Every structure is written in structure tokens, then in C-alpha cells.
Amino acid sequence: MTKEVEILAYKYMESQDDETVFDYLQDTDGKVRTIAGKTIQLRGSDELFYQVISLKNAQKYYLRELCAFILGQFKTVNQDILAQIPPILLALSKDNSISVKTNAIYALGHFYGCHSMNLPLSDIDDKIRKMILSYSTHPTSSVRVSCAFALGNLPDDKTVRATLNQLLNDENAEVSEWAEVSLEILDNK
């Protein structure tokens, strides 16, 4: 998809009603699904939130993946909805699909990067922190990359920093680069 076509696709998607945009999450083209997902993120309505979370148990892995992707940057000020997102993403991080797991961890990083100041810390936050720390040694590099990214958006502590310092020496260059970026983010908090 060329940049011009992508811009037209975004403009088209913006002009559609919520139901039509949601239906595009089922499209056979991954780029169309992503554009629909980004459109839903920006709209951030309560109705769309409840439609999106219906995807968390979908048969198709890419719908569960989209659920995580959308929730990570879902634009809402509704505190009740915001409080529901971390447990859903935690559950998706335990998915058998590596791509769902990876996207859920990325989504948690985005979520905490955007919303951690607006929400009181809870028990679920500690579970999420422990999960991300435990996955930082996962055999799949995409999972470790997502962990390195997410750790920079979690509350700073010695364990998070120690894990990021270990990830600096990861065999995968992308993991070590994200670990470096996350340490810089923590230094600037």
C-alpha cells in the first residue's frame, strides 16, 4: 500500500460509522485491519470498547492480537474502562500465540506510558510487572523486544533496571536497543 493509498484509506475509515469500522477488523488485508484498529483507538467510545473486548476470546489469533493492539492505546478518559484494560492485556499476554503475547506486552507498555499517571497502582500492576519480568528471558526474541519496550513505561525500581541491564547484552540487536531506550526513559522520568 503506497503512502497516498494509506492516507486515503485512513480518510475513508474516518468517514465510516463505528459498526462499519469494527467490521473492517475482519478484513483479509492486515493493513486494512490495522487502519480500522487505529481508527477505533482514536474514537475511544464506550460502545467500541465493549465491542473490542469481545475479541479477546476470538478463534482467529489476529483478532485477539487486534484486541491487544487497540486496547494499548485506546483513547478514553472513562476511568472504569481504563481500569478494565490492564487485566485484559495481562490475560492476552498468556495467550499461546506468540504474536498475541508479543502484542499484549507492547500494548501494556503503551498503556502504562499513556495512563500510569492517571490511575492508582493496584495489585494487577504488580502481576503485570512480574509477568513482563518473567517473559524478559523468553526464547522468542519478539517477546523479549516487547518486554524491553514495556519495562521503560513501568514504575522504576531496581529489578526493572537490573532486567533492562541484562537485556542490553541480548543476542538480538533490537532487544538490546529497546533496553537502552527504556533505560533512558526511566532516567528521564
Image: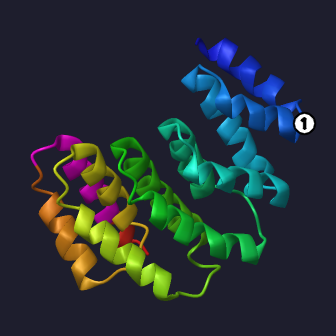
Task: Please state, as top left, top right, bottom left or bottom right, where the N terminus lies in the image.
Answer: top right
Q: Residue at x 12, y 52 (%)?
A: 170
* Kind of element beneath mark 1: loop
Q: Quadrant of residue 186?
A: bottom left
Q: Residue at x 41, y 57 (%)?
A: 105
Question: x, y percentage for residue 40?
Answer: 74, 44
How packed mark 1 is, by other alpha carbons closer than 10 Å (few <14, some 14-19, many 20 or more), is few
Q: Is residue 139 left or right of residue 110?
A: left
Position of residue 177 relative to residue 80, above or below, is above
Position of residue 142 relative to residue 108, above or below, is above
Position of residue 123 relative to residue 33, above or below, is below
Q: Residue at x 59, y 79 (%)?
A: 117
Task: Please state, as top left, top right, bottom left or bottom right, where the C terminus lies in the image.
Answer: bottom left
Q: Quadrant of residue 164?
A: bottom left
Magenta part of the protein: which range? 171-183
Q: Is residue 106 magenta?
A: no
Most common SS among magenta residues: helix
User: At label 1, which amino acid type do we have?
Assistant: Asp
Question: x, y percentage for residue 151?
Answer: 35, 66
Q: Is residue 187 visible?
A: no
Q: Is residue 14 left or right of residue 102?
A: right
Q: Is residue 174 magenta?
A: yes
Residue on which the image places disc 1: 17
Question: x, y percentage for residue 53?
Answer: 66, 56
Q: Residue at x 66, y 40 (%)?
A: 37
Question: x, y percentage for residue 172?
Answer: 15, 43
